[in-house]
């Protein structure tokens, strides 16, 4: 790295660039200069002295030459560039446009990592609640949490919604989230929906003795999001679901720090598949669903699990987990990882092995499709979690007077 | 297609799905049902009658079987699904989350086309000015427009900015845009920047006798964008540049229809390369930079040209052009296509052949790097445009007392 003044004054972006013939060192220098001061070698010395603080720096260039028989596209380099904080305002749009605005269109290039300077990070509040805050709200500190997702409720009325909510809640789930494709509609507008669902939550709480967070889907016009959130909260919503990528990270960042939006925000990964899956283009999942979500203040972050129907490779899941939990991002609070899709009780041992106890086990079909009904589905998951924590084999735990878990294992199997 | 009630009540999404073995018809049905009512075949008949209006429909499934020697990934299907408008609110986030939220993460699938129902489209105002309105503001109706881009101005002061602006303007360009990576900064805050640049514009106008639009970069916190836009406009900005994809399409949509933001908005494609280049993932350029930009109200849309340094295939450029100009999207006004990057005067014949006269010729290095200076660069482009419209060969036109054009052709060549 050229003499960067202090490490703290630069944000570091790492790109993977594929090219059969490129001089990657030259390309790296072109990025570092082109996306900051524009030109460098032609500047007079006096001007260089003034401009040096604005100049991007090449931190490293690791070239991977293809081995025999590997296709030509196997030649790539990981290029890390340091961008001076002084060049952009302290918001995520400015950072992303700087480091990957024009560059995203420049051939086979993917943004694979991003490190915020302390100075840049200090402009963000991060998650208002974080893992600890969500646990405090629920009063649950000794086990992974359990969430259940409304199954499709488009075209349903409030009575049906309430019943579905109650059935999920009765099984002992900690969180319930709206379907992310449920928008404002005449049958179940957000205030009425929140009202009846929170009634159902209260009813279930009396029976289960536990608390429950309901994440209502925050939707509609961008500049009305704060009012819409307040409407939901005034109606009793004690959490919000937000399709972050449809609105940009800054909207989340501003919502999460708004004084009137004093409930946990759950980030949905809708549209994320437009960015992360290609090896050659886009933004890697650990940046998109990990680092940026935490910086922007998501208390919980959903992402496709490696276990079920919508599959993300396990190492990408682990990179997201690391980004959401690492102490390196302190003082930002930690965000709850919520690996999602295709989860059934028999996968709980795998989830806990991969994620430890700071995880939300998130079930859709695994609750609603349980052979004994949704409430039994919730119980089966809680039994699976308790069974794992007890240290006995889950198969044995199920056989030992846990019929709901047994039924789930019979239906969907068990991976230990 | 199953019996969809009326065509007008559905938005149509077309996906290209790659899969070596999938039953694409089954997959299509899974999408149509899964992203709308959730389940169908199990519903009682009475419930089906109630839910039918919410049910997605498979419009078509065109399977492309790979031919001999084509790699396995060559097997794909283009699947078109009709989504009932009644399922989502009339905003772009709701539409995108519905049609490509979860689905974007489901294997190799790319959103390649999108057709709005008349009802959905009617909720949008589209471009406030459009091509005609921008031409009226400039008083130029008989030729393609010419735009020039500030070269990197990070670290420059107001005096340097003013001088660069004046030099560009003096050559006869119609529009000048900020660098998209110029954010709020102490040296050139937006009000002061607009003030001095509009002074320079006035000075140049006296000399050239023509009008000029200056698109100031609209940046900063999402919920402050309207105030920031007003600040720029109050300082004299007569156009705005906006990094749409960093904020989401809805922000553009709301800005473009806001009563106090009565200037053309130019959409920058920053971050677009995270979406469109992969054949297997993301959102195709005609949707991202064409249909959605026009719907959301961009008066001018920048995108990577097929001619220069940042390359997009020509057929994708033509699809964007079609989306921005087609009468099929009426009553939405037409948006100006602005193919960008690597443009020099010798490419003007190609640009006009591809785009016709409703295009903005957009130059960066082709103006600033002209051997005789930036003002001469502007004149060279204007000469190239006039030469093309005159019907003579550009080489002859240059030789015939147009030394700026001649110098440009000598420096960068000519493609006719």
Image: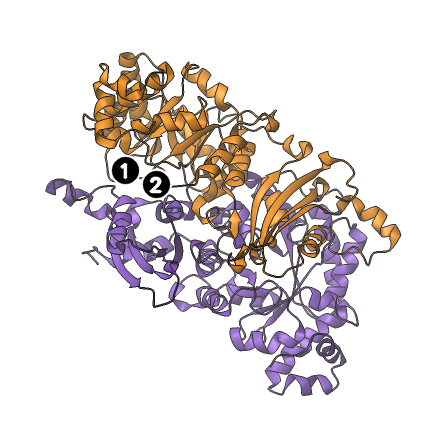
Chain colours: A orange, B purple
Q: Which mark is residue A181?
A: 2
**Foreground pick, A310 / B275:** A310
**Residue A150 in the image: above or below residue B35:** above
Query: Badge 2: few (under 14), some or many (20 or more) residues near its Cα, within 10 Å?
Result: many
Label 1–label 2 contact, CB within 8 A: yes
Residue A21, x across and y down, in percent = 62, 61
Residue B30 sits above or below residue A118 on the image: below
Q: Quadrant of the N terminus of chain A?
A: top right
- Identify the element where label 1 is drawn: loop
Where A356 falls versus B241 (above or below)?
Answer: above
Quarter of the image holding residue B110? bottom left
> Residue A352 appears in which quarter of the rendering?
top left
Q: Which residue is found at the position 78% from the left and 69% from the top?
A: B373
Q: In which quarter of the image is residue A167?
A: top left
Residue A233 seen = no
Q: Is residue A195 visible?
A: yes
Which dot marks residue B88?
A: none
Closer-to-camera residue (A407/A216): A407
Which mark, by number, is residue A152? 1
Q: Which chain carries label 2?
A: A
């Amino acid at each position: 790295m050229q003499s960067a003044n202090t490490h703290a004054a630069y944000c570091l972006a790492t790109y993977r660039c594929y090219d059969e013939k490129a001089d990657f060192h030259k390309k790296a220098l072109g990025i570092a200069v082109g996306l900051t001061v524009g030109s460098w070698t032609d500047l007079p010395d006096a001007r260089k002295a003034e401009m040096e603080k604005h100049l991007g720096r090449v931190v490293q260039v690791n070239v991977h030459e293809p081995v025999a028989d590997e296709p030509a596209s196997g030649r790539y380099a990981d290029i890390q560039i340091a961008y001076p904080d002084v060049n952009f305002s302290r918001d995520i749009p400015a950072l992303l446009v700087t480091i990957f605005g024009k560059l995203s269109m420049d051939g086979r290039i993917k943004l694979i990592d991003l490190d915020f300077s302390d100075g840049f990070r200090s402009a963000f509040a991060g998650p208002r609640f974080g893992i600890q805050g969500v646990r405090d709200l629920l009063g649950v500190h000794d086990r992974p949490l359990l969430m259940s997702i409304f199954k499709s409720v488009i075209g349903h009325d409030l009575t049906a919604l309430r019943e579905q909510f109650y059935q999920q809640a009765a099984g002992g789930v900690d969180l319930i989230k709206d379907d992310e494709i449920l928008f404002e509609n005449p049958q179940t507008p957000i205030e009425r929906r929140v009202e009846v669902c929170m009634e159902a939550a209260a009813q279930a709480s009396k029976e289960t003795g536990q608390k429950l967070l309901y994440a209502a889907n925050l939707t509609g016009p961008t500049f009305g999001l704060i009012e819409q959130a307040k409407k939901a909260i005034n109606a009793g919503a004690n959490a919000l679901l937000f399709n972050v990528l449809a609105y940009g990270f800054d909207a989340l960042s501003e919502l999460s720090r708004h004084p009137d939006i004093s409930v946990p925000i759950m980030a949905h990964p809708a549209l994320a598949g437009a960015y992360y899956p290609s090896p050659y283009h886009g933004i890697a999942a650990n940046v998109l669903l990990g680092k940026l979500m935490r910086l922007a203040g998501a208390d919980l972050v959903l992402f496709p699990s490696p276990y079920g129907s919508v599959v993300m490779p396990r190492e990408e899941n682990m990179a997201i987990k690391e980004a959401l939990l690492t102490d390196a991002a302190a003082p930002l609070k930690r965000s709850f990882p919520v690996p999602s899709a295709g989860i059934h009780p028999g996968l709980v041992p795998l989830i806990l092995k991969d994620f430890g106890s700071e995880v939300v086990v998130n079930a859709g079909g695994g609750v609603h499709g349980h052979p004994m009904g949704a409430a039994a589905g919730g119980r089966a998951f809680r039994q699976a979690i308790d069974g794992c924590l007890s240290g006995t084999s889950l198969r044995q735990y199920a056989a030992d007077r846990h019929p709901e878990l047994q039924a789930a294992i019979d239906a969907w199997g068990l991976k230990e």
